Image: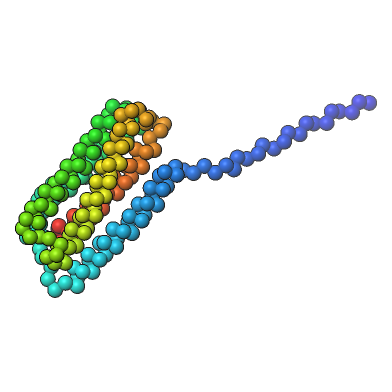
């Protein structure tokens, strides 16, 4: 009597435990950097609030600063966040031409913001509104000046990204540098909205 063949036993499939991060290292590094920037501006704003609350008298911003001009400049900067968002959306749709166009608009608006801020500084200094004139003046120049430097750095970064985009470096499958630059730019815009509210409107 023949024995039946033994049933074959298949080896169990091995589960894939390879960990795949949901964000790129570049984006993670930017988030860490923005965390340090949040702490930096928190220190500036906290110092400003302490000095303001401890002052016997604080000048009315509307009497010292050109609030309408800066409000318009703030609107321009907010628009640059919109154009930055459109640029990223365009490259996700693999539309390089529209991506380059909106990226150029973002750079132009950022440069215009810095230029208008320079005009404001020149007008204030001509009226003897200088850092040595008082606490209000010194905190104004420190806070807006540091932010202005961040905007200039952002414009420089965007120019580099734009040049690479013009060369066809990015597509719908590879646009991490553009996304990282956008994170920084949106952060700079959000910080300015906060600074404008505290320094110019309150």
Residue 87 vs residue 201: left or right?
right
Residue 30 appears in the rendering: yes
Residue 165 image position (x, y, % from top left): 32, 31
Q: Where 80 falls versus 51 (above or below)? A: above
Colour mapping used in the image: rainbow
Q: Is residue 67 above or below residue 77?
A: below
Q: Name the residue furthest right.
A: 1
Nearest the eye: 61 or 150: 150
Q: Residue drawn at (28%, 27%), measured in percent from left and top?
A: 97
Residue in the picture at 33% in, 42% down: 181
Q: Residue at x 33, y 59 (%)?
A: 39
* Count of numbered badges drawn on the protein: 0
Q: Looking at the picture, does residue 147 appear above or below residue 167?
A: below
| Residue lying at 22% horizontally and 64% vertically, measured from the top left | 48
Residue 136 falls in image quadrant = bottom left
Quadrant of the drawing holding the C terminus: bottom left
Q: Residue 42, position in %: x, y?
A: 29, 60
Q: Is residue 36 shown left or right of residue 77?
A: right
Give the quarter of the figure containing the N terminus: top right
Observer able to see residue 23: no
x, y (%) of residue 164? 33, 32
Q: Quadrant of residue 130?
A: bottom left
């Amino acid at each position: 009597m023949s024995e039946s063949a033994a049933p074959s036993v298949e080896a169990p499939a091995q589960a894939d435990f390879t960990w795949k991060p949901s964000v790129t290292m570049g984006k993670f590094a930017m988030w860490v950097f923005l965390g340090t920037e949040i702490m930096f501006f928190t220190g500036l704003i906290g110092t400003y609030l302490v000095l303001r609350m401890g002052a016997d008298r604080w000048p009315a911003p509307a009497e010292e600063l050109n609030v309408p001009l800066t409000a318009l400049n703030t609107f321009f900067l907010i628009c640059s966040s919109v154009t930055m968002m459109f640029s990223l959306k365009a490259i996700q749709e693999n539309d390089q031409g529209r991506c380059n166009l909106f990226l150029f608009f973002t750079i132009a608006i950022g440069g215009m913001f810095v230029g208008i801020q320079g005009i404001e500084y020149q007008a204030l200094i001509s009226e003897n509104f200088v850092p040595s004139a008082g606490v209000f003046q010194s905190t104004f120049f420190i806070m807006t000046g540091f932010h202005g430097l961040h905007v200039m750095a952002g414009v420089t970064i965007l120019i580099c990204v734009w040049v690479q985009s013009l060369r066809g470096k990015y597509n719908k499958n590879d646009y991490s540098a553009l996304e990282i630059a956008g994170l920084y730019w949106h952060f700079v815009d959000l910080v300015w909205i906060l600074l404008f509210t505290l320094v110019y409107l309150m």
